[in-house]
Image (cartoon, grey):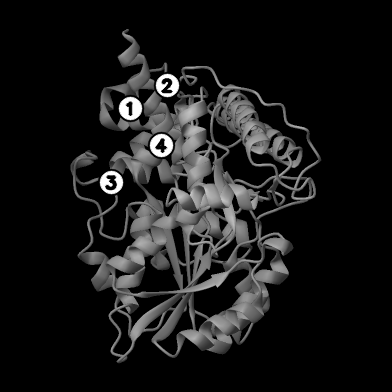
Amino acid sequence: MSVLDESTAEMKRISASVWGNLETRAVQIMAEIQQVLAACLYPPLLDDDTLPADVRERAQMFLGHCVGGSIGSYPECNGITKVQHSVSEFISRRDGATADPDNIYITKGSTEALLMLLRLFAPSAHPLQTGVLTPVPSYKGFTRVLSVQGAAMVPYYLCEEEGWSIQIDDLRKAIQIARRHCNPMALYVVNPGNPTGHLQSKDSIKEVIRFAAEEKLLIIADEVYQNCVYGEGREFFSYKKALVELGPPYCNLVELASINSVSKGAMGECGLRCGYMELVNLDSSMDQNKIFSITPFAPVLGQIALDVMVDPPQPRQPSYPLYTQEVQSIKRATMNNVQKTLEVFNSLTGITLQPIGGGLFAFPRLHMSQAAIDHAQERDLHPDVMYCSRLLEEEGLLILPGSKLGMKKGAHYIRVSLGAHEDMMTEALRRLERFHLRFLHEFPCSALAGGHAHRPAPATPTDLPPPPLCEAL
């Protein structure tokens, strides 16, 4: 392979890990999915004893739900009935409350679910533009969806000092200001957080639900990272479960749309494009069936993967040992990446990082000196963009500047992915630390500004930058 070919291959690895793609890991994710898909695509494998019996049974069952026994046939618009029931049973087990399969809609991933949802209420008859309360920082794709549907983003800022928590007073202020120019109809929340890595507590969730009831807002709960939770004693608590626990009148009145996807967590099957949305208490005037009937159905292969995610192999089934081994390996690797990331950033002057409770990203804050800020402004760059550009040029490491996520002026952040292979993550953190120490030597900042005091050495990069490794976005 030529040097150019090697560089191109490495840049592809950068691109993959920039978006938190778990397939960049060495671990081969979910053999169960691959085996079931193989048997569905090539039915003669149903008679092949090299595949576990439960894999062949699942594949046979899926083919039985497909017209003509082929996964190439059209499925139902709202999703394959068997998958809807598997999702409803998964939600019922998770929350201890029944989920109606008729309220489950299978989608082509979380972004399309958001787009479909906004189609239900964004074209409002109200003279003002529809508004959606949106956290800052947040999932960048959601703001694009708002723009496509002609809805207004109503920003509410998460409180960094309180672990990126949602402050009800800030929600009240945001909605009061928004009503001057738009008609707020929905509240978007991301739990666990992207990019903040925060995990919302049960009490916080219930406070948000009470606020939504008071303001008559639809809650859009983006819960795609619900299987990515870190730390002893921490657990994911869904908005649906909190709504049920609150009881009447909330459980009967508050409109809720909960979203999940096969792209995140231990599954990480981004390319299969599938997820689900559960709609609870939706206004009867919103004809969701009409919207979903004109939307392209989720790919059948993706729906098979979703079924495996919500109804995985059980202890007495032949596939269970390998499935469990894979899941544990992925979770262990991610947890190790979280720990390494916390250790590195907490040791550096000029950087602060809140605890990471969940998700696949860290969102450290850069405390830059005035000299660094002036240097960036002289080049017509945002300070964190300048930081990230130099990091890429000098160390071949690609990360996302926080200013791209709409942060307040004067606050500088970077978004770091936790989804890379452990070896790649270790090398990425080593390069970032090396660059940061050089940056501090050039633009010294107060030792009190994050981390521990350092006396950075003027390490000089080589004439040629290291080969591109991966991002930390």
| Residue at mark 2 to residue at mark 4: CA–CA distance | 11 Å
Q: Nearer the viewer, mark 2 or mark 1?
A: 1
- Residue 401 at x, y = what percent? 50, 48
Numbered circle sitting on residue 105: none
- Dot 3 crowding, Cα within 10 Å, few <14, some 14–19, many 20+: some
**Is residue 201 at all visible to an observer of this figure?**
yes
User: In the rendered structure, which amino acid carries the disc numbered 2?
Assistant: Leu
Q: Nearer the viewer, mark 4 or mark 3?
A: 3
Numbered circle sitting on residue 38: 1
Numbered circle sitting on residue 51: 2
- Dot 2 crowding, Cα within 10 Å, few <14, some 14–19, many 20+: some
Q: Secondary structure at mark 1?
A: helix
* Residue that numbered label 3 is attached to: 299
Q: Secondary structure at mark 2?
A: loop
At horizontal 70% and vertical 33% (from top left) the residue drawn is 340
User: In the rendered structure, which amino acid carries the disc numbered 1?
Assistant: Ala
User: In the rendered structure, which amino acid carries the disc numbered 4?
Assistant: Arg
- List the single residue furthest toward the top: 1
| Residue at mark 2 to residue at mark 3: CA–CA distance | 24 Å
Specify whether 29 is left or right of 250. left
**Which quadrant of the figure contains the N terminus?**
top left
User: In the rendered structure, which amino acid carries the disc numbered 3?
Assistant: Pro
Q: Are marks 4 and 3 in contact (CB under 8 Å)?
A: no
* Viewer-nearest residue: 445 or 65: 445
